[in-house]
């Protein structure tokens, strides 16, 4: 084959990706997936710096509950501050994030018929002493949210004593079980937005992340 044609075929050819396949089978089996080191420490460092810079420039706002039009700030429910990301205006740091996420979304759309058409992401900073009470991401908010994604941007030395676990609740027949996950840097957690209730335990040290949703339209 000529070089150009060969390249074209390479692009068209679907390549199975073991990491993405693992995510898909976890989602099917448990409705959530935890991927450690989805971003490496160097990438996390760049994203953390960008988040902190924007926070310092006072671009964040107190996170609200409800939808974007009908929102109220209730610190008894959640105490984080957020900044929505605009992919069209993404800087170098945010491009690192979107490149990896988009590759995953493309794969999910090719293999799972999820029909993800839109996505939305925000930086989040939980100051010391804050939390996010148990909730469902679609509650009074957005029924188009299919998958929730959270990626942690904390430092390498995040200690369990710092709290800030994401607790995911699952119904097991009549009983309920829960699993807790610490916000270790580079860790990505994906879960079904319409199914799994979850909460963020009180943090004893500033906790940084990017949170977002893959939506059907
Ligand atoms: O930061 C987390 O671990 C989860 C955040 C969350 O549940 C949300 O923003 O809806
Ligand atoms: Fe949530």
Image (cartoon, rainbow, N blue to C red):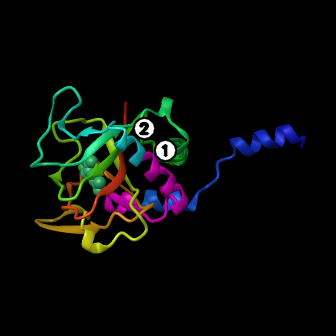
Q: Looking at the picture, how far across and down is residue 28, in whole percent?
A: 37, 58
| Label at residue 116 | 2
Pick the front one: 34 or 11: 34
Q: Is residue 173 visible?
A: yes
Q: Which residue is mark 1?
A: 105
Q: Are marks 1 and 2 in contact (CB under 8 Å)?
A: yes
In this rendering, position of residue 79 left or right of residue 32: left
Q: Quadrant of residue 26?
A: bottom left
Magenta span dominant secondary structure: helix
Callout 1: CB less than 8 Å from ligand 1? no
Q: Looking at the picture, how far across and down is residue 4, in whole percent?
A: 85, 38
Instruction: Name the residue furthest front.
Output: 56
Q: Residues within 10 Å of mark 1 (few under 14, many from 20)?
A: many
Magenta range? 26-51
Queried whether the magenta region covers residue 48, the answer comes back as yes
- Considering only vertical position in the picture, is 29 above or below 150? below
In this rendering, position of residue 187 left or right of residue 163: right
Label 1 to label 2: alpha-carbon separation = 7 Å
Q: Which secondary structure lies at badge 1?
A: helix
Name the residue located 45 percent from the left edge and 60 percent from the top edge.
Answer: 186
Q: Which circle's residue, 1 or 2, is located before the other in the chain?
A: 1
Q: Quadrant of residue 25?
A: bottom left
In this rendering, position of residue 203 left or right of residue 12: left
Instruction: Name the residue furthest top.
Output: 69
| Label at residue 212 | none
Name the residue located 26 percent from the left edge and 44 percent from the top edge.
Answer: 81
Name the residue located 69 percent from the left edge and 41 percent from the top edge.
Answer: 12
Quadrant showing the N terminus: top right
Pick the front one: 197 or 30: 197
Callout 2: CB less than 8 Å from ligand 1? no
Pick the front one: 90 or 214: 90
């Amino acid at each position: 084959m000529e070089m150009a044609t060969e390249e074209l075929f390479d692009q068209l050819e679907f390549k199975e990706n073991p990491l993405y396949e693992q995510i898909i089978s976890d989602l099917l089996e448990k409705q959530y997936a935890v991927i450690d080191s989805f971003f490496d420490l160097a990438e996390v460092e760049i994203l953390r710096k960008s988040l902190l810079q924007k926070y310092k420039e006072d671009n964040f706002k107190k996170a609200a509950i409800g939808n974007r039009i009908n929102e109220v700030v209730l610190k008894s429910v959640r105490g984080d501050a957020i900044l929505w990301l605009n992919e069209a205006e993404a800087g170098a740091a945010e491009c690192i994030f979107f490149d990896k996420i988009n590759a995953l979304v493309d794969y999910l759309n090719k293999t799972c018929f999820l029909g993800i058409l839109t996505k939305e992401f925000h930086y989040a900073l939980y100051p010391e002493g804050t939390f996010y009470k148990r909730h469902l991401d679609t509650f009074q908010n957005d029924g188009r949210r299919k998958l929730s994604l959270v990626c942690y941007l904390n430092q390498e030395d995040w200690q369990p004593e710092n709290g800030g676990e994401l607790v995911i609740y699952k119904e097991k027949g009549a009983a309920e079980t829960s699993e807790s996950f610490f916000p270790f840097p580079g860790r990505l957690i994906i879960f079904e937005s319409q199914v799994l209730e979850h909460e963020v335990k009180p943090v004893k040290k500033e906790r940084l992340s990017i949170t977002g949703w893959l939506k059907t339209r």
